[in-house]
Image (tube, grey):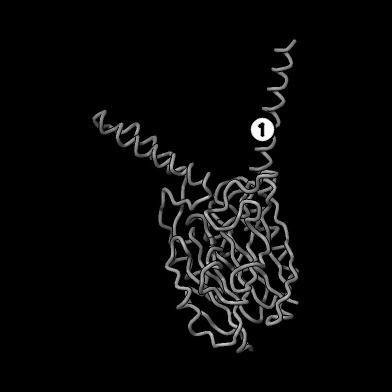
């Protein structure tokens, strides 16, 4: 009798696990939610801001097509003053067509469309390639001692990756360059202002500037250089793919910061929080959303993103962000 109940319990547990995995892989990822904020920030009072981040467009599939349909339907009803794009447009070079489809769907924004690049706009991090290298090393035609040495090195890299996830540190593995120049050309062709370590005034406002800094992991961020042309007394909207820039000593005081990169953790466990926040200073219990206690009195919005790097989401749906400054 005991064994019978144990078998039933095991079967139910396996069925529940399979259901949760199916939901995380195909259910929540296909949703596209709208997250709205009303922020008290007097320098930008009245501004309506559309913030899109972390699309991670890649090879065509039904989830990506469904996301694009929902994105276009949502954007069609919006009338923003400014559109902010905070990087990771592509997961790999197969995503350029989807990026262009999204850019065509952007609503008119009288004060401009601005962007920075993310780490995946420079390079693809591939779990598949990582495991493929391990298998290749195991199958390589080499002397046994050399083969074992190479396999041990690959396994150490895998263990280091697992340790970094556990410690919530940055991940960088199996890097394959993406065609960044092609992405920049595409953004320019749709009149997107790419703010790679530069700042400019918001049209019609000399007291309000918008700045963007290069990616913290794959780029060459120069925050102090970016902000040097901002006049004394002017206020800054800062774009950065990686939210850790907000904690830098040179981050704009009392500014408004927009970021992404964390994907909200993607998989959020009750009472524990996100499995991983992409190696940022943000806690597992608060890897995305609104932050108001930053150094210098700045406020920050970190998007959960519209896509993801690992194809799983649980209790953390993708989002489009709408901000009204009051």
**Picture quarter with the N terminus:** top right
Label 1 sits on a secondary structure element that is: helix
Q: Nearer the viewer, residue 239 or 83?
A: 239
Residue at (61%, 71%) from the top-left corner? Answer: 257
Given residues 96 and 2, the one toward you in this image is 2
Q: Position of residue 42 (x, y in %)?
A: 71, 81
Q: x%, y% of residue 284?
A: 62, 51
Mark yes or no: residue 188 visible.
no
Q: Is 17 placed above or below 323 here? A: above
Residue at the spot of label 1: 18
Q: Residues within 10 Å of mark 1 (few under 14, many from 20)?
A: few
Is 162 on the left or on the right of 84, as rendered?
Answer: left
Q: Considering only vertical position in the picture, is 140 above or below 86?
A: above
How many circles with numbers are drawn on the protein?
1
State the residue at coordinates (71%, 70%): 323
Quick one: quadrant of the C terminus?
bottom right
The location of residue 124, given as percent across then percent down, is 46, 53
Quadrant of residue 259 within the rendered picture: bottom right
Nearest to the observer: residue 184 or residue 165: 165
Is residue 93 at least partly visible in the picture? yes
Q: Nearer the viewer, residue 156 or 124?
A: 156
Q: Position of residue 310 (x, y in %)?
A: 56, 47
Q: Residue furthest top?
A: 1
Q: As displayed, is residue 187 above or below residue 210?
A: above
- Locate residue 269: give its quadrant: top right
In screen coordinates, is 179 left or right of 321?
left
Which residue lies at the image location 69% right of the left edge and 80% below the top edge? 44
| Residue 65 in the figure: left or right of residue 221 | right
* Residue beneath the point at 58% across and 59% down: 54
């Amino acid at each position: 009798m005991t064994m019978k109940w144990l078998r039933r319990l095991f079967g139910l547990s396996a069925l529940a696990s399979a259901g949760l995995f199916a939901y995380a892989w195909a259910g929540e990822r296909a949703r596209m939610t709208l997250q709205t904020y009303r922020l008290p920030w007097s320098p930008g009072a009245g501004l309506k801001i559309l913030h899109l981040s972390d699309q991670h467009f890649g090879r065509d599939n039904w989830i990506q097509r469904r996301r694009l349909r929902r994105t276009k339907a949502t954007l069609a009803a919006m009338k923003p003053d400014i559109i902010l794009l905070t990087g990771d447009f592509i997961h790999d070079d197969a995503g350029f067509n989807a990026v262009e489809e999204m850019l065509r769907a952007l609503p008119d924004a009288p004060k401009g469309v601005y962007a920075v690049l993310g780490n995946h706009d420079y390079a693809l991090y591939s779990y598949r390639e990582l495991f493929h290298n391990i298998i290749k090393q195991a199958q390589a035609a080499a002397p046994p001692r050399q083969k074992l040495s190479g396999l041990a090195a690959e396994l150490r890299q895998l263990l280091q990756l697992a340790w970094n996830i556990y410690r919530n540190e940055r991940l960088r593995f199996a890097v394959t360059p993406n065609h960044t120049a092609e992405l920049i050309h595409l953004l320019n062709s749709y009149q997107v202002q790419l703010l790679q370590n530069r700042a400019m005034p918001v049209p019609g406002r000399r007291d309000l500037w918008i700045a963007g800094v290069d990616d913290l992991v794959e780029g060459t961020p120069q925050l102090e250089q970016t902000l040097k042309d901002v006049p004394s007394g002017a206020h800054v909207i800062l774009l950065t793919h990686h939210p850790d820039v907000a904690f830098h000593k040179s981050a704009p005081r009392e500014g408004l910061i927009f970021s992404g990169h964390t994907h909200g953790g993607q998989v959020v466990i009750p009472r524990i929080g996100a499995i991983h926040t992409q190696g940022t200073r943000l806690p597992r219990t608060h890897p995305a959303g609104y932050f108001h206690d930053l150094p210098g009195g700045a406020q920050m919005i970190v998007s959960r993103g519209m896509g993801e790097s690992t194809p799983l989401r649980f209790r953390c749906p993708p989002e489009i962000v709408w901000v009204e400054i009051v």
